[in-house]
Amino acid sequence: MRPSLSYLLLLLLCPPLWAQEIAVVVPIKSPIQELTTHEVANIFLSKTTRSDEGLRIKTLELNSKEYKALFYGKISGKSLSQLKSYWSTIIFTGKGMPPKSFDNTSGLILELKQNDLAITYLPYDQVDTSMRVVYSFIVQND
Amino acid sequence: MSTIVKTISCVLTILLYAVPAPAISASLSDRVSLNGFFTFQAITADDVGVVIPGILGDAVTLEKDKASYDESLVGLQLDANISDNLSLILQGISTKASEEEYKPTMEWAYLKYDLGRDLFLRAGKLKLPFLKGTELRYIGHTRLWVRPLVPNNGAGGFDEYLGAELYKNTSFNQNNITLHAAYGKSNHIKDSIQDNRVGLLSVQLERDNDWVKLALFKGIYDIYTPMNTLLQSNAVMDMASLEAKLSLDKFIIHGGYVNGKAESFPDLAMSYLSLGYSSGQFTPFIMYNARSATFTPVTPPGGGGGAPPPGGAPPPGGIPLAADGTRESIGYSLGVKYDINESYSIKLQRDNITISDNTNPILGYQEDNANVYTLTIEGVF
């Protein structure tokens, strides 16, 4: 087989580009209405711990490397390794704690609905009417 | 070098069989969490009596071709939320005190109060946040190198303190700014420095993975002779530091400069510059660091004061307690950090260290050069 033909076949066999939208959500009763990328990063990296009203925000996330890599890569430019190093710095100087981690989406959503000051990020297709999207972005993978 | 080979074999065996999947911190409840860290370190040198600043101590003396494991440690931190605003933080480490004994110490123990608007008050036993490495010297996983660039004396011999600290996080044009103000009483690493009051102001500007930090430190202290006679009261030490980290694509640059002026104590200067290249799990790096302590003669009370003229006898009653001159250490390092996963890493580093000293009037100028080899396995859990 000629090399050029094999490259062509390889390209044809490659999966198409796919896009995924990730939404940062809060319960519908939350005082948080809308956030910028910088504000989302500050909340999830424990630099901002309270809402404008002075209420403590509770960050939640799914224990998924895939979503963490997509989310933190977008909001802060940090890889998973850089993120772990960042949290080590923050935790061991007593400056904050990472978001509460959940092993499954149902537990995460249940906790979100029980706390008006909770915030998390989810694939857009899992957002329901009890939540408000305060920030979203599209990730394209090839 | 056979020691290093044996150590590497031993470490790799441990890693293959014992290192679990990335561990996460343990949340004992919604209010209490426990986090830990460890460092296993083997160091050897190709010269006799090489002295380097270690993780734990002011100086580690190495024997030729014999590995030292004394810098290994394990630590735990407990964070307990007492109320919505108040939390208690305790951090302890255990180090090897002797062949068979381990020595636990409490490094941090304080209450933290959230005043709102990202302003926090901490009070208790704290570390002076003079340099990035001062607060994180035991958590090797947070740095590229095998050991902190600063000796354990932190700011001119002042490391931890009993006192209070205010810090505030704020934002400006997509940049995060952290302001620190600390004040308290500190134990100096030398017993002759007593009744110390320390204060510190710092500002850090951060954007994504990059940051720059400026810190100003002032220490006021009394100096005693070895016979516990007061030599000088309210002596003053002023220090300033500037550090930065910059990421350019896959390149990571760290740099820092420290300068300190002190009464009846050596003036201190330190600088470092490192360049790393992040290539997947591997980050090779090169580094330069230099430290110097410039001594000026100290005379006991009633002394004629001042140093003897060059080549001359000291003035009557004015025998200097410390010599005149500079002690300097310059190091060039080459190393690599390998991230096993997000929580564990292995580092190998070779340092070429030159130490020069002209503070001894009898021995005159002395210079020594040695290579130091270090293998480290570090992690957080």
Image (spheres, coloured by chain):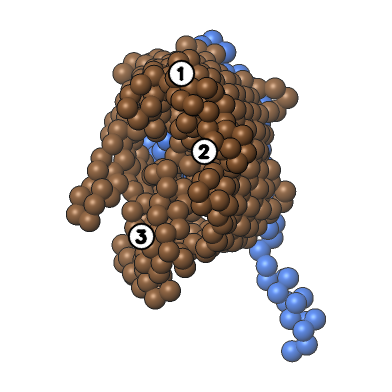
Chain colours: A blue, B brown
Give neighbour class at mark 1: few <14, some 14-19, many 20+ (Cα, 10 Å).
few
Q: Give the vertical position of B13 relative to B133 (above or below).
A: below
- Give the residue displayed 45% in from the left and 58% down from the top: B50
In this rendering, which labeled residue sits more in front, label 1 or label 2? 1
Label 3: chain letter: B
> In the rendered structure, which amino acid carries the disc numbered 1?
Gly
Q: Which of the labelled discs sits on residue A136, or is there none? A: none
Label 1: chain letter: B
The quadrant holding residue B332 is bottom right
Report helix, strand or loop for mark 2.
loop
Horizontal relation, residue B83 to residue B200: left or right:
left
Q: Which residue is mark 2?
A: B323
> Residue extending furthest bottom?
A1
> In the rendered structure, which amino acid carries the disc numbered 2?
Ala
Give neighbour class at mark 3: few <14, some 14-19, many 20+ (Cα, 10 Å).
some
Number of numbered discs overlaid on the protein picture: 3
Considering only order in the chain, which callout, 2 or 1, is on the residue closer to the N terminus? 1
State the CA–CA distance, disc 1 to disc 3: 46 Å
* Nearer to the camera, B358 or B346: B358
Horizontal relation, residue A104 to residue B261: left or right:
left
The answer to whether residue A76 of the structure is visible from this angle is: no
Q: Which residue is mark 1?
A: B302
The reply to whether the C-beta atoms of the residues labelled 2 and 3 are less than 8 Å apart is: no
Considering only order in the chain, which callout, 3 or 1, is on the residue closer to the N terminus? 3
> Residue extending furthest left?
B100
In this rendering, which labeled residue sits more in front, label 2 or label 3? 2
State the CA–CA distance, disc 2 to disc 3: 32 Å
